[in-house]
Amino acid sequence: MLSRSSLFRGYSHLQRRLFSTGRPCRAKDIRFGDPVRSQLLQGVEILAAAVGLTLGPKGRTVALEQYKSEPKITKDGFTVARAIDLRDSFQNVGAKLVVDVAENTNKKAGDGTSTATVLACSIARLAMDSIKKGCSPAEIRQGIMLGASKAVEHLRQISKPVTTPEEIKQVAVISANGDEHVGNLISTAMEKVGKHGIVTVKEGTTLHDEVEVINGLEIEHGYISPYFVNSKTGSKVEMTNCFILYCDFKVNEIRDIVPALELCVNMNRPLLIVAEDIEGDALTTLVINKMRNNLSVCAVKSPSFGEGRSESLKDLAAATGGKVFGDESDIEIRDVKVEHLGKADEVSITNEETLILKGKGDPEEIAKRAAQIDYLISKAKNEFIRDGLEERKSKARL
């Protein structure tokens, strides 16, 4: 059993482990001028050449060596970009600058990383050529930004929203190298989960591809500390048969959440804490006990902000059968009981997002909460507010 005293044990020991690395500093190799610019460009071009192979409906696959694992064959440009490390450190700096371009594209659009990489390489090549001819780098940057602005404006004018299942299928088939079957599966999945729904891909145990719709929730924040990671195959936190504690305030003191921790330890169940923030003594003590006592716990920030945060927490609590603790709560968090905690069959957390699958909320409470949001949608004064409410409803799967 995890006692209150054990939650505070080893604080100074962990501080020494976390902050006293004792690593020697390596001298920096500093270079200037055209030679190093040429090396940077070479790194950009090497990475773009590898990523560019995957571009388009007839793009080719790339085989990637993996440490202590079998090679991976992929057509995903972002996966290829992340896997590249060049021996020459200056070429590698150039390559990593383009990886950053691909990563930002992936975060904002979820696709188009190969196109962004090839464009970045072309822009860099022409910019370097102009610098060699005596142009000012600052003026070149201004020109690039102006050109990008004009290009985006034109693309918005000629773009066509993808809305129907058939249009979604057409885009999916192209991304799947012309595979009609995969395109149909993606179109079906998108139609079932809706505009703001979540589609994830997992390896199956049968010979056939399948689409399964699971009641799930999304929080657009990941784990607060990487020390919560428990997955052996990646930077994820994975929990099953999980309890969830909702806090509409910043958790600074560990004593506020000790009762919930003790409940979970006594029942041998993992605990996910969703709060405005967790910091100071509370976060440090959770990390200590995760690392030294193998406590199954993770903390994430609650979605949205201000009044929207409180309402989003209530949505999540309704969908998982929990209660939100805060200023509006009629129960102190230190008096928490099992019935006050949300419950879910599966929880998957990365550094960017949290997915809660198969929540155990009361169907009547869920329907009541959904009706409240539907009423607000019907009374919304503009499209922006309406879209925000619809997204909120979709993320909580109400």
Image (cartoon, rainbow, N blue to C red):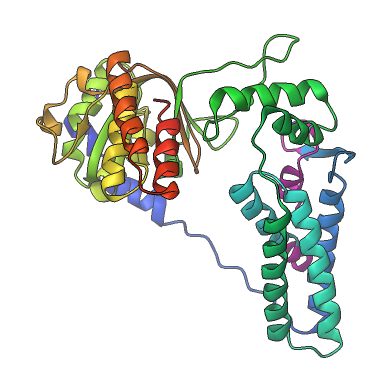
Q: At x 40% / y 32%, what residue is drawn?
A: 393
- In the image, residue 360 sits, relative to residue 323, either above or below, namely above
Picture quarter with the N terminus: top left
> From the viewer's perspective, is 148 left or right of 34?
left
Which residue: 62% across, 23% down? Answer: 189
Closer to the camera in the image, 384 or 206: 384
Question: Is residue 33 found inside the magenta-colored segment of the image?
Answer: no
Q: Is residue 71 magenta?
A: yes
Specify the farthest residue to the bottom: 134
User: Looking at the picture, how far across and down is residue 41, in whole percent?
Assistant: 82, 69
The x, y position of residue 30, in whole percent, is 69, 79
Image coords of residue 118 (percent x, y): 81, 57
> Residue 221: in sight, yes or no?
no
Q: Total marks drawn? A: 0
Q: Position of residue 230 (x, y in %)?
A: 48, 31
Taking the image as shown, residue 58 lies to the left or right of residue 285, namely right
Residue 90 horizontal side relative to residue 109, left or right: right
Q: Is residue 320 above or below residue 288?
A: above
Quadrant hosting residue 267: top left
Nearer the observer, 257 or 112: 112
Q: Residue at x 32, y 46 (%)?
A: 13
**8 relative to 182, above or below:** below
Task: Say left or right for 254 vs 291.
Answer: left
Range covered by the magenta-colored residues: 66-94
Snapshot quadrant of residue 162: top right
